[in-house]
Image: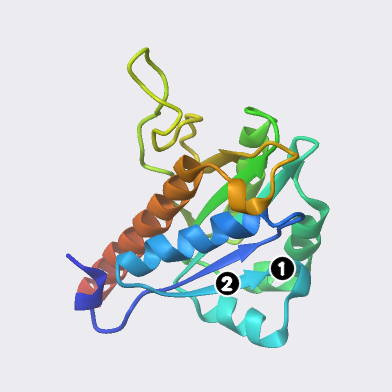
Amino acid sequence: MNISEINSPVHLVVAYHSGWGHTEVLAEAVTDGARTAGAATGLVPVDRITDPDWSALDEADAIVFGSPTYLGDVSAGFKTFAEATSRRCSEGRWRDKVAAGFTNSGAMSGDKLHALVSLSIFAAQHHMHWVNLGMTAGWNSTVASPEDSNRLGFWLGAGAQTNVDLPPNAMSESDIRTCAQLGERVARVTAQLRVGQAALL
């Protein structure tokens, strides 16, 4: 089923912090992937969030969270945003929205899993439905390649790696493609949830 077949398009927003521009490239890839599945999309840079951005998040069907991994966790910029959602959390404004996450670091590992766990716990505290990456690991055999999707082998969300001396336009095409596939998956799962909810009415 293409999600354009449901009564109104799924609305997916990516809320992200990007210190040097790399995470922003991945955020754009997530929205590109979601649009291929027929979703309406938006980008919210959380360090420059506005009142209309807050409204877009409140009205979204799905929110995909993105942050660089700094010192083994999400960035201070993302944490500031997360703490600013405390009233929304207590009021349940994002309850039953769909959520997912992605992160980038300079090291191949860089403790990115910890950052993804932080994002998933943040979503759980808002009573959201977390969607995993839904992909097998790439680049894990002698016939595999660093060009494989999910080349770093994450499951909870999308993990990317960028050498610290490279600009955002030199990021791995594999990581960009992986984030696009995450966006498409989240859009489709959100549509499935909406159809299921409608069937119960």
Please say if 127 is above or below 40. above
Q: Distance between the residues labelled 2 and 1?
A: 9 Å
Depth check: give the residue in front, 82 or 166.
Answer: 166
Can see residue 30? yes
Please say if 157 is above or below 10. above
Badge 1 density bin: few <14, some 14–19, many ≥20, Cα 10 Å: many
Q: Name the spot of residue 56 as percent of width and height, x first.
A: 57, 81
Q: Is mark 1 on a helix, strand or loop?
A: helix
Can see residue 125? no
Going by the picture, which residue comes out furthest to the top? 142
Q: Which amino acid does label 2 sit on?
A: Leu
Please say if 53 is above or below 196. below
Instruction: Tell me the residue at 80%/36% (across/down).
Output: 71
Instruction: Tell me the residue at 66%/67% (across/down).
Output: 89
Q: Mark 2 points at which residue?
A: 43
Q: Name the spot of residue 12 as percent of width and height, x first.
A: 46, 70
Q: In which quarter of the image is residue 138?
A: top left
Instruction: Tell me the residue at 74%/39% (across/down).
Output: 164
Side of 27 where 33 appears, left or right: left
Side of 191 where 169 appears, left or right: right
Instruction: Please identify the quadrant where the N terminus is shown.
Output: bottom left
Going by the picture, which residue comes out furthest to the bottom? 52
Side of 170 where 7 appears, left or right: left
Q: Is mark 2 on a helix, strand or loop?
A: strand
Q: Name the residue under label 1.
A: 46
Q: Which amino acid does label 1 sit on?
A: Val
Badge 2 density bin: few <14, some 14–19, many ≥20, Cα 10 Å: many
Q: Name the spot of residue 44 as percent of width and height, x first.
A: 63, 72
Instruction: Tell me the residue at 32%/17% (across/down).
Output: 143
Please say if 24 is above or below 93. above
